Image (tube, rainbow, N blue to C red):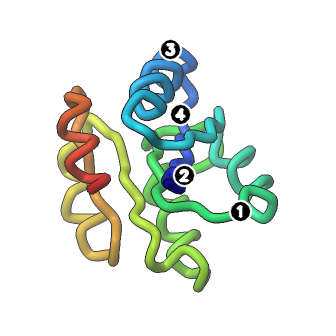
């Protein structure tokens, strides 16, 4: 069985490690990135991506900015983008875009996995 590949973009290493470990246990292949810049610099070499899970706040751009940038590229239009944020007001901003979902913080792993089915 081919594992689904998830790119996790999270600048907090503790959160990134927990998400990574749980997703691996659940059978996903996980590629972690500490920033949107490192992710964007690597996307051409990653290969197939099934899900993108991103934090909202980064030093250079927001998760919504990253989502919009990716959704302008044909390759990423059908890949689900899950934005993790404590700002519930983002739901309206992100729900207007195809395959973009808000995962409100704090969240359970069950809630995350439900979005990845």
The residue furthest bottom is 74
- Please report the residue visible at 28 percent of the width from the left and 59 percent of the height from the top: 101
Q: Mark 2: give few (<14), some (14-19) or many (20+) Cα within 10 Å.
A: many
Tell which of 17 and 34 is nearer to you.
Answer: 17
Residue 81, relative to residue 58: is it above or below? below
- Please report the residue visible at 47 percent of the width from the left and 45 percent of the height from the top: 54
Residue 23 located left or right of residue 45:
left
Helix, strand or loop at label 4? It is loop
Q: Which residue is mark 3?
A: 14
Q: Which mark is residue 10?
A: 4
Q: Which residue is mark 2?
A: 5
Disc with the residue nearer the chain's start (2 vs 1): 2
Q: Are marks 1 and 3 in contact (CB under 8 Å)?
A: no
- CA–CA distance in space, label 4 to label 2: 16 Å
Q: Which residue is mark 1?
A: 47
- CA–CA distance in space, label 3 to label 2: 20 Å
Q: Position of residue 31 (x, y in %)?
A: 62, 41
Q: Position of residue 92 (x, y in %)?
A: 20, 64
The residue furthest front is 1
Q: Mark 3: give few (<14), some (14-19) or many (20+) Cα within 10 Å.
A: few
């Amino acid at each position: 069985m081919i594992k689904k590949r998830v790119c996790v973009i999270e600048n907090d290493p503790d959160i990134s490690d927990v998400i990574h470990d749980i997703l691996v246990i659940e059978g996903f292949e996980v590629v972690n990135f500490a920033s949107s810049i490192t992710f964007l610099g690597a996307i051409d070499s990653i290969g197939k991506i099934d899900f993108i899970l991103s934090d909202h706040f980064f030093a250079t751009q927001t998760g919504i900015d990253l989502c919009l940038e990716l959704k302008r590229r044909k390759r990423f239009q059908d890949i689900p983008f899950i934005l993790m944020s404590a700002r519930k007001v983002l739901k309206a901003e992100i729900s207007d875009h195809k395959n973009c979902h808000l995962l409100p913080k704090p969240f359970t792993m069950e809630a995350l996995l439900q979005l990845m089915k």
